Image: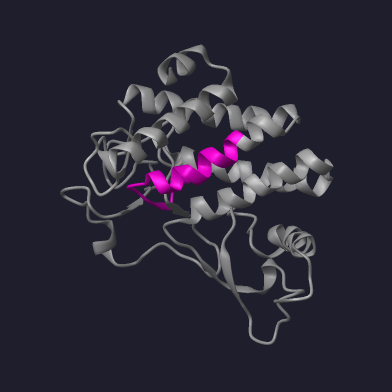
Amino acid sequence: ATPESLAAKAAAYDARVLGLHVAPQMPWVLDVTIAPGVDPETATVSDVVAWRSGENDGLWSSLVLAAEAYRFAATHDPAARTALETLLHGEQLRMQITGVPGLFTRELIPPGVAGIACPTDPAAYTPSPDKTSNVWVRIDDAGCAGGTTHCGLTQFAGWCFLDNVSQDEYVGHIFALGAVARLVDDPALRAIAVDLLSQIGHHLVANHMEFVDWDGRPTQWGKVHPDAPGGDSPGYLAVLGASFLATAADGTGDADLAAAYA
């Protein structure tokens, strides 16, 4: 309904995504609120007054990562490489903060960023007895999560993250990382994607096709096998789990993951 072509719209977004939607301390894509009176077509990170984070940040940011993988493969545009490098670093942080190889968080918030902050209500950090709700986890100054013995996270002291990641989030992550592994011929960038895919694949194999959270409990909607409880059909979960392993095996060339897929 507008005169621009899809290519023109894509080029406009490519030109804006890092300048407005990605903060230096948060290398993933977020929706924003900009200061009143600022032209949205020229606004930059410095004009952002609120970062609108949410429980599906990883999925949305991954779709941009996948787009940049296709863009770089077709054009080798240096700007596309910069976008890939930035967003892949965000993927690394999103996994590292959980302290569990292969496990992403839904949402993560660093301290000291204007326009976004960890929840202040203590109830937001109360563990879910039956793992049926997403709960915030704070990393203390000693690098331990939620006042537990899950430690070694001093890099993220003062951060918080939202647990109980879902299979829907992983659809985006695995699609994007698989695209980078298959399409991007930059060795450094591809190595990051391959490493993350390897961690995901081995996490699934070790945990019988379930994503096990930082607290040692399977996530509510991260069970990708036919007999998983919930509303998804067994056939869908079978295909989804197989596609996750297939992408990891294909992207990494790992014989063990290929055998698990077979």
Q: Which residue is rendered at x = 75% and y = 46% of the image?
A: 71
> Is any atom of residue 250 visible in this view?
yes
In the rendered image, residue 173 lying in the magenta stretch gets the answer yes
On the rendered structure, is 39 left or right of 26?
A: right
Residue 14: image quadrant is bottom right
Q: Position of residue 148 (x, y in %)?
A: 26, 41
Q: Position of residue 164 (x, y in %)?
A: 32, 47
Residue 218: image quadrant is top left
In the rendered image, residue 116 lying in the magenta stretch gets the answer no
Check the image and report above or below for 2 versus 167: below
Residues in magenta, as a range: 155-178
Task: Name the quarter where the C terminus is drawn.
Answer: top left
Q: Which residue is rendered at x = 37% and y = 64% of the image?
A: 119
Viewer-nearest residue: 114 or 178:
178
Residue that lies at the very extreme toward the bottom in this rendered image: 37
On the rendered structure, is 137 left or right of 255?
A: left
> Is any atom of residue 159 visible in this view?
no
Q: Which residue is rendered at x = 50% and y = 50% of the image?
A: 58
Task: Name the quarter where the N terminus is drawn.
Answer: bottom right
On the rendered structure, is 154 left or right of 42?
A: left
